[in-house]
Amino acid sequence: MDLDRNSLGLGGKPALVLVDMINGFTHSECPLGTDCPDVVAANKQLLEIFRAQALPIFFTTVVYHNEAQARVFRQRINALNLLTPESDWVKIDGRLAMLTGEVLIEKQWASAFFKTNLDAQLKALGVDSIVVTGLTTSGCVRATVVDGLQNNYAVIVAEEAVGDRNPDAHAANLFDMHAKYADVQPVQQVINALQSS
């Protein structure tokens, strides 16, 4: 049975958080990645509207600078060791190139909030809600969504702008996030809300 919950929607000052839209996750040549042109295209749509309204935009990447960082996580998923500073895999996908003023958050674990300054930067800007996109739905997206809620942001997941290597995991995690932690909304609904605010 589903829990009763309220749809919180966008607040007065939303930010866009693009989780790990990096070459290592958007290209199947990397063992961590999958080809996902539709997810990239949906992220481009959201970038355009957030840029047009001069709203805050944050990208994340995963980079390991030494053997000690996220040691256990990397022991579990050996392919993470490909994500080194000199690798093209850690760069934002060129189809979503960052513009001046947009922020890149380097992380070592799943959540964009864990051991980063994302929360401090959002609070400094007066952000009260976040639209979360990116890869993967069952991994870093979900972890970021849960931590977003736990840091007292209303969270929206833009449905077509998230993706996963496993379609069943994608669907199950969208269901779970919508049930407990976030409003899962079609990209067009998010755009409509931004345009009407």
Image: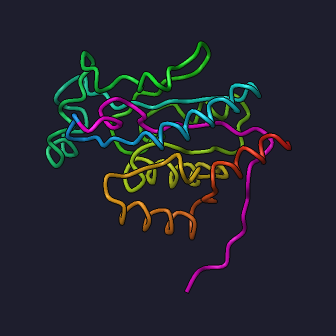
Which image quadrant is residue 185 in?
A: bottom right
Residue 49, horizontal then vertical, whole percent: 70, 33
Farthest residue, direction top: 100
Task: Give the camera-side residue of 134 and 80.
Answer: 134
Residue located 50% across and 20% down the image: 97
The quarter in which the N terminus is drawn is bottom right
- Residue 136 painted magenta: no
180 w.r.t. 100: above or below: below
Query: What is the count of numbered marks?
Result: 0
Report which quarter residue 9 is drawn in: bottom right
- Left or right: residue 87 versus residue 11 is left
Nearer to us in this view, 121 or 2: 2
Q: Magenta region, mostly helix, strand or loop?
A: loop
Residue 68, position as x, y percentages in the image: 19, 31
Residue plotted at (56% across, 45% down) = 132
Residue at the extreme bottom:
1
Residue 80 picture quarter: top left
In the rendered image, residue 11 lying in the magenta stretch gets the answer yes
Pick whichever, 121 or 173, lies toward us. 173
- Position of the C terminus, as image quadrant, is top right
Q: Position of residue 91 (x, y in %)?
A: 36, 22
Which residues make up the magenta segment?
A: 1-28
> Residue 22 versus residue 85: which sits nearer the camera?
22
Horizontally, residue 104 falls left or right of residue 70, namely: right
Q: Residue at x 72, y 68 (%)?
A: 6
130 sits left or right of 28 in the view: right
**In this figure, which colouring scheme has been used for the structure?**
rainbow
